[in-house]
Image (cartoon, rainbow, N blue to C red):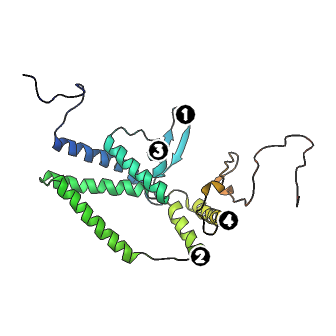
Amino acid sequence: MSSAVELVNPNAEHVGKQQALLINTAAAKGLQSVLKSNLGPKGTLKMLVGGAGQIKLTKDGHTLLQEMQIQHPTATLIARTATATDDTVGDGTTSTVLFVGELLKQSERHLSEGCHPRIIVDGFDIAKKAMIEFLETFKKKFPDIVSDREQLCNVCRTALQTKLRADVADQMTEIVTDALLTIRKEGQPIDLHMVEVIHMLHKMDLDTRLVKGLVLDHGARHPAMPKELKNV
């Protein structure tokens, strides 16, 4: 009599539930170990080398997760969650990965003691509700933050100082804040496509500046074209 259980893929690896839990936890800890050295102003840069030999230096978690080729389904799910957080609020990719990895690391201890995963998940839900209640009482409201340029600079500086050098972060804080206030329209969502980033390969990072207007990065189309126009 044939077996009642038949694998769809005979070459697939079949593991028990306990081993599967350990494999998923190990994947989360592996992703955490890659990104944990990026966090904070003293985080280290990672060198990414593409297939064509292009080199990219970054410690931005969103960039690393996009460039990395992640094979494990659990690690892929964590990476997608972290990038979704960055797409929503603009920051927090590395923190999300580290937080999820640490939760699963602590869960591994309870799993080894025989605790059912459902109980651990219920504990996570209780902790989430308690944290949301705490944040509601701890948060500070800024009803007119648009007029508070210093507070906007503080928010921007907090995000940039974990990704850039201190001197570059301070300069970019002013540029980003002024760009935001320039394109802002009352009662309308901010359209980030109104800000164009142009790379000048022959310039240094500290030469970055904000131009409140149009930048045409090309030469004249005809020798008779004027080189400069004022009040046209």
Rendering quarter of residue 26: top left
Disc on the earlier residue, 3 or 1:
1
Which quarter of the picture shows residue 177? bottom right
**Mark 4: amino acid:** Thr
Amino acid type, label 3: Gln
Calculate the distance from the C-alpha at mark 3 to the C-alpha at mark 1.
17 Å
Q: Residue sitting at 56 percent across and 62 percent down?
A: 166
Classify mark 1: residues with Cα within 10 Å, few (<14), some (14-19) or many (20+): few
Residue 223, how many percent across, how many down? 91, 40
Residue type at tag 2: Asp
> Could you tell me which residue is drawn at 10 percent across and 26 percent down?
3
Report the mark closest to the observer, 3 or 1: 3
204 or 127: nearer the eye? 127
In terms of sequence position, does the residue under pointer 3 or pointer 2 come before the other? 3
* C-beta proximity under 8 Å, tags 3 and 1: no
- Helix, strand or loop at mark 3: helix
| Residue at the right extreme, as displayed | 224
Query: Residue 66's mark?
Result: 3
For this orientation, the residue located farthest to the top is 1
Which residue is located at x 47 percent, y 57 percent? Answer: 88
Residue drawn at 73 percent across, 61 percent down: 212
Name the residue carrying label 4: 182
Looking at the figure, which quarter contains the N terminus? Answer: top left
SS category of the residue bearing label 1: loop
**Residue 30, label in figure:** none
Q: Which residue is mark 1?
A: 53
Type of residue at label 1?
Answer: Gly
Calculate the distance from the C-alpha at mark 4 to the C-alpha at mark 1: 38 Å
From the viewer's perspective, is the residue at label 2 or at label 1 nearer? 2
Left or right? Give the position of 198 relative to 91: right
